[in-house]
């Protein structure tokens, strides 16, 4: 008999969803948020319940800067609070989103989510309009 996997959202994941909703609303794409929620419940969570190790191992990517090294060390320290297994941390990429999750026993914790455009620079915002 296969083990039953439970997917749980942590508070940070829920904050990230609120950030994405604001981000999409500012870009006049509020329907995209509903589509994201549908994709999360119908596909992402369903997939992780069946295949929890399907995402890429997050820590397999080498740090390429001092800042990313420090961030990875902090992340590993936080991860060690829930599991000693550094391979428990995965990323799941779908549509325009990246989900960071940890597989700990029979529980998959959804830790963070970002829209790919949230990861880029918003020059118009910084310059107060269009670039000159």
Image (cartoon, rainbow, N blue to C red):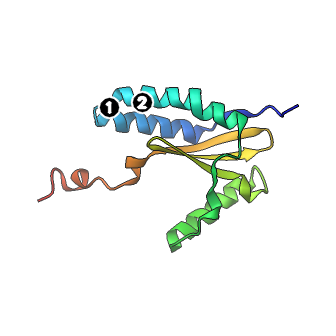
Secondary structure type for disc 1:
loop
Position of the N terminus by quadrant: top right
- The residue labelled by disc 2 is 33
Residue at the image position 49 percent from the left and 40 percent from the top: 16
Determine whether, in the image, residue 126 is placed left or right of residue 49. Answer: left
Position of the C terminus by quadrant: bottom left
Residue 119 location in percent, x, y? 41, 53
Residue 84 location in percent, x, y? 79, 57
Q: Residues within 10 Å of mark 1 (few under 14, many from 20)?
A: few
Whether 4 is drawn above or below 89: the answer is: above
Q: Residue furthest left?
A: 132
Determine whether, in the image, residue 104 is placed left or right of residue 91. Answer: right
Residue 82 location in percent, x, y? 75, 49
Q: Residues within 10 Å of mark 2 (few under 14, many from 20)?
A: some
Residue at the image position 56 percent from the left and 63 percent from the top: 71
Q: Disc number at residue 12?
A: none
Secondary structure type for disc 2:
helix
> 56 or 108: nearer the eye?
56
Cα separation, mark 2 vs mark 1, equals 8 Å
Residue at the image position 54 percent from the left and 35 percent from the top: 14
Mark 2 and mark 1 residues within 8 Å of each other at the beta carbon: yes
- The residue labelled by disc 1 is 29
């Amino acid at each position: 008999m296969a083990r039953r996997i439970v997917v749980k959202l942590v508070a940070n994941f829920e904050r990230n969803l609120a950030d994405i909703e604001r981000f999409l609303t500012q870009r006049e794409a509020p329907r995209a948020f509903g589509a994201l929620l549908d994709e999360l419940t119908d596909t992402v969570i369903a997939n992780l319940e069946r295949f929890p190790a399907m995402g890429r191992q997050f820590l397999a990517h080498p740090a390429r800067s001092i800042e990313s090294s420090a961030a990875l060390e902090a992340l590993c320290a936080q991860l060690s609070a829930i599991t000693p297994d550094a391979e428990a941390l995965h990323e799941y990429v779908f549509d325009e989103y990246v989900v960071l999750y940890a597989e700990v026993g029979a529980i998959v914790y959804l830790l963070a989510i970002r829209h790919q455009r949230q990861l880029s620079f918003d020059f118009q915002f910084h310059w107060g309009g269009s670039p000159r």
